[in-house]
Image (cartoon, helix red, strand yellow):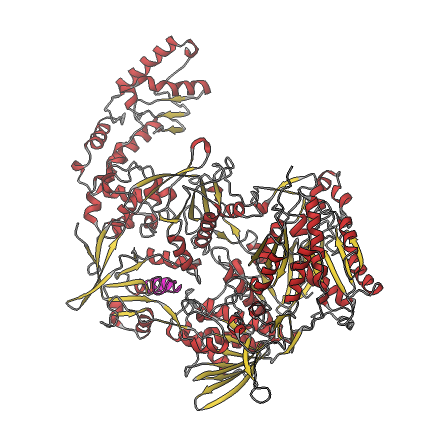
Amino acid sequence: MNVELLTLSEIVDVEGDAGNFTIKVKKKSRYVDTDKCIACGLCAEKCPKKVDDEFNANMGKRKAIYIKYGQSVPLKYAIDPDNCIYLTRGKCRACEKFCPTGAINFDDKEEIVSINVGAVILAPGFKAFDPSGLDCYGYGIIPDVVTSLEYERMLSAGGPFQGHLVRPSDHTEPKKIAWLQCVGSRNTNQCKNGYCSNVCCMYAIKQAMVTSEHLSGEGTEQSIFYMDIRSHGKEFERYYENARKGDVQFIQARPHTIDPGKNNNGVIMRYTNTEGRQIVKEFDLAVLSVGLEAPEDAPQLAEKFKIELNHYGFAKTKDFNPVSTIRPGVFVTGAFQAPKDIPQSVTEASTAAAEAARILSASRGSLTKTKTYPPENDVKDQVPSIGVFICSCGINIANTVDVHALAEYAKDLPYVSFVDNNLFTCSADTQAIIAEKIKEHKLNRIVIAACTPRTHEPLFQDTLKEASLNGYLVEMVNIRNQNSWVHQKEPEKATQKAKDQVWMGVARVAKNYPLDQISVNVVRKALVIGGGLAGMNSALALADQGYDCILIENNDRLGGNAWFLNHTYKGEPIRPMLEKIIDKVENNEKINVIKNAQLLSVQGSIGNFSSEIQADNEKINVNYGVAVVATGAKESRPAEYMYGKDDRIMTHLEFDAAVRNNNNEIKKAKSAVFIQCVGSRDEKRPYCSRVCCTHAVESAIFLKTVNPEMNVYILYRDMRTYGDREDLYKKARDLGVLFIRFNRNDKPEVSIENNEIYVKVYEPVVQLPVKLYADFLILAAAIVPNKNDELVELYKCGVNQDGFLNEAHPKLKPVDMPVDGLFVAGMCNYPKPVDESIAQGLAAASRAGVILSRDKMKLDAIKSMVTDKCDGCALCVDACPYNAIKLEHDSEKTGKSYVVSDPALCRGCGICEATCPKGGIIVHGFTTEQIQAQVDAALTNQLIY
Amino acid sequence: MSEKFEPTIIGFLCNWCAYAGADLAGVSRLQYPPNMRPIRVMCSGMVPADIVVNALEQGADGVMVMG
Amino acid sequence: MAEILLGREKPGIFKDKVMELLPEGGNLNACLTCGACSSGCPATGLEDMDPKKFLRMAALGMDEQVTSTPWVWMCTMCRRCIHVCPMEIDIPQLVYYARQSWPRDKRPRGILASCDLALKNDTCSAMGTNEEDFEFVVEDVLDEYREAQPEFAEMKAPVNKQGAEFFFNQNSREPVTEPDEMVPLWKILHLVGANWTYGTKGWAAENYCMFLADDKAWKHIVETKAKAVEDLGCKVWLNTE
């Protein structure tokens, strides 16, 4: 309701400044009235014009009237004017004739609309690299060479081959598939993309793993040809390891050319193995892992908004302001800023929202719309009077299911007082009819036999509410997605199934009772735990939105790890920025900083937490609605490579300190050796510490800059300078830093001979052992999380196997924690550099702001409830995955034990219900009785009341 | 002529995964036999064992708990 | 081979010297060791060497091996390596300078002899064919074909035709060992009506002095041929090599 979508639109002109932009937008014609279109698909079915489907990488066909893909928002058809027969040749109008709702409008005119906004977020995404120009891979010439995006569609159940994996040349199932990494990335010869595209290693591994699931039988093989595997995200390294241990072969090599196979089926490639031998190998299919480029219209967009682009054409930002442009009020997010994966993109979407919320905080809520409903009729004790509305969904349902027979059948079901069949039950006019019939026939329960409740239940709940009925008195029966669409060839059996489904729905809804959404008061204050860069930025963003914050830090100063770092990867000095931020935080009247603080207790749940905090010599009680957890991580103490035996063997942070202290020995050194993955990516810590490769490369560049004669060696397993950090890797090589790859099973050996440090390593290209003299040995010690045991215990939140705090969902909710009202930011979630920590800190503030912006919040009514049958056996307490159930003891009155369920924590999963042997706890809307009624209806055709 | 055996199957589908998957199967027009009677639940863990047993007792030929 | 000791001293200087000679240093430091070069190199595996390894040895300062491996003479200078190299590293140039570091008389006899023969007279023929012999062979073959194939009775193979459009080079193996091999090209040129000529000077297409990495001799050969083209006033110099 508060998001207005302008689709098929482009920016024409931008005027004004932060807080008051006027933006002219050209809205192209859709030729379909979105208010009338109900996405039945009849138009597309009747449209005679077939067009290559760009969403399916042109491997399938769509019509000239189409929706781009099933998950489109809004789910409304559009006419492609370049291909529409009527719009190009003046005849046809088939869609118009067949559209049951009259939604087609060929008179639709392009228009310029002017919108007034306070802030702008640019998220135009990326363009996939087009490998057509590369002569060596034969893309576009050899049929069985496809891009990774095409392959993604080929694997998809909704793709051109319905998920049955076949190769383009002869439509047979490919058994041997090769992926070629870095096509259009890390390459300044065949393209100008010197950066790493950040996501291709992981998507290739994913595709290979999914392929394993698709292919069966003997002789299948997935091979990934790579330069460095970059699995630097959370849980990525584990995924990579699983793939390695499983069916996927990782070949560190780059084939030179792809040649067509026999009869133009499949491909032939030649590559050199690690022993320097050429191998000629045939594959059934080659997938080019294409990189991400800035969108084509980025320069025009940049010009209109007067923002800067970097040398690769991506939006230019600073590490300390990761989504801000040089134009105040204009923010960027997603892959437009740099190639990035979904977790990072989703996180930074919230970062941009936080920045926008900052400048708009004064006018927050001024344009917000809310809906009001008439008072509810109390129908709880009334005998059920059920209305059944059967949807034809155009012909989507009616073509397979005999809806008239279904309606006749429904009329005879118990308690049913009204049955109707509608062409489109979801259309606006049918909503009005339903409301009318509710009043006319005094209906108090409604069954909608149509599509899926997952998309449409809110709509019908709304209709009921507008008709003064409780929204939970409706039951949707899914006779489309789970019936007519999947039994198209068996109409009789489908109709029988639909009858049973309606019967089940009637049986169930008869047992529905009104439910109230729980409303909780929100304490509009945030607790931020941890005063590093992530926590401080979070607190500042919350304060700027107008919310009070309590920032607790267990140290005696704010700043965390940032004190130990010299500059960001883009070269921004950290110390001055850090001091500025600390100053801002300490002088912000909305932020209450408590140092040397320890969280002692946590009570309550989302909207209303209370805690006791130990600070120096006093205990402080605080109330807050949300908490941002930013407890950080730290550099570990290495347990190998003779660390601790000699001062010249140090970690990255120790080396940085030596640089800050102007240690002269460093500049005079003849040789410096770096060893990577010290305590990372091993059995004990099977994760990548993400920051060390860039750190080592930066330090190496520093050394080569102060003393070009110095011999600098970096011993590594895979260089993981993702995104445009790759520029630093290139710069280091250009300066003469020598990178030597080592194998995890053949690690470098450090020795001290006559007070001189030596590192022995096997050089894999010349295949000889190399002994390196080192004046300094710098170890990339793993980043480990700070201890979170107490916090996890207090909040009942979780950590992953490596001890990093979990997010609710890695992609969909990367900043929310599994416990409602808690948000995570910075390195406690996973090792990350300054820019990403700040981005997540800001994102957490944005997500927290969603809750703090209201003084009351509503929760879903599908919650567990303890009944009087509970005898306190507590079986359910441990079964609850959300820690929502507690055991209590009434020592004063009854002396009995019983459980209490906290509705704010409960997610309504009902494991308690299934666990309880006595019916002592139920879930509203999904009681055992209701489920049993459905089973009975399905099997006995006889309701037991 | 013998009639083909048509089993009656009760399916419990978790709202968040199996039910969504069944919806997607519909969107993708994947065809499967019409013998299952779907029941949406908020979690496959909420299906009491009693109901499963009861369904079989009442004549269900199979019960699928999907989640 | 024993382990390589690095770090204390400045490593080998060969690679740095080559880098000074090349624009952008030939990007020789930029190697990602991806191996695309070796995957496509026709000489990979010969002498236990490949382009990636060769460059790596140079980077590690293994000058002795780099400047002594006979592998450099197996490189065909086809440039397939640099074509696909993501960093556009000029491995062919590194190979070239490695060849140059060989004493001239130690370089492969076949290439050396061919270069020396080409230097002997202005035909630049690596077979040592002189001007008269070349002219005779061309006329002889032409006559034979004009007679045997009446449809080509009008075909010409001009020699030293002043002001012709195209100055045509000829691999010098053909007039000596496979004279018939010259004819198909003549036919094409005849059928398209090209205004072309051979020159008695500078007609030989090949340049073994380049492969020998003998800069001075290479330059001499190129200059001799260029002069021949200019002397005949031809506009286009067509080299079939």
Determine the residue located farthest toward the right in the rendered image: A440
Apparent side of residue A716 relative to residue A2 in the rendered image (left or right) = left
Residue A141 visible in image: yes
Apparent side of residue A231 relative to residue A59 in the rendered image (left or right) = left
A52 lies above or below C193? below
Give the quadrant of the N terminus of chain A: bottom right
- Indicate the position of residue A339 as horizontal and vertical percent values: 48, 57
- Indicate the position of residue A368 as horizontal and vertical percent values: 69, 70
Residue range of the region highlighted in magenta in the rendering: A682-700
- Indicate the position of residue A939 as horizontal and vertical percent values: 66, 55
Q: Quadrant of residue A753?
A: bottom left
Apparent side of residue C84 relative to residue A931 in the rendered image (left or right) = left
Q: Is residue A886 or residue A939 the one in the foreground?
A: A939
Q: Is residue A694 magenta?
A: yes
Q: Quadrant of residue A706?
A: bottom left
A84 lies above or below C175? below
Q: Residue at x 32, y 65 (%)?
A: A679
- Indicate the position of residue A544 as horizontal and vertical percent values: 57, 76
Q: Is residue A203 magenta?
A: no
Q: Is residue A316 or residue A304 the one in the foreground?
A: A316
Q: Quadrant of residue B31?
A: top right
Q: Is residue A406 or residue A649 the one in the foreground?
A: A406
Q: Is residue A587 or residue A934 the one in the foreground?
A: A934
Give the quadrant of the C terminus of chain A: bottom right
Number of marks in the image? 0
